[in-house]
Image (cartoon, helix red, strand yellow):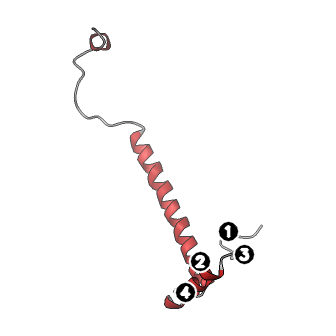
Amino acid sequence: MPALDEKQNITLRLSRKTIQKARVLAARRSTSISGLLASQIEQLADTDDDYERAMQEALALMNPGFDLGGTHKLDRAALHER
């Protein structure tokens, strides 16, 4: 099984217009289309990892709940009296 950090090629089908725009964009950034796509996909993957980690941390904080002080002065029956 190949290592997870080993590079592997993929194939994409894009319109000629998109490819032309990508060439110009890549040239402006002094890279290739392949390099441009690789960096964007890596950035998306890292951002998703960061989101997942933040969500897990937030859920872990919410699990035990927060003590906001206050006390209940009415019981359930009193709240539902008509």
Of callouts 2 and 3, the N-terminal one: 3
Of callouts 2 and 1, the N-terminal one: 1
Packing grade of label 2 (10 A; few <14, some 14-19, many >=20) is some
Cα gap from disc 2 to disc 1, whole angstroms: 18 Å
Disc on res. 11? 3
Q: Is residue 58 above or below residue 64?
A: below
Write down the residue under mark 2. 37
Cα gap from disc 3 to disc 1, whole angstroms: 19 Å
Residue at 72% x, 77% y is 9
Q: Looking at the figure, which quarter contains the N terminus?
A: bottom right
Q: Tell me whether circle 4 and circle 3 mark residues in contact (CB < 8 Å).
A: no
Amino acid residing under circle 2: Leu
Q: Quadrant of residue 64?
A: top left
Residue at 32% x, 37% y is 66
Q: Is residue 32 above or below residue 5?
A: below
Disc on res. 4? 1
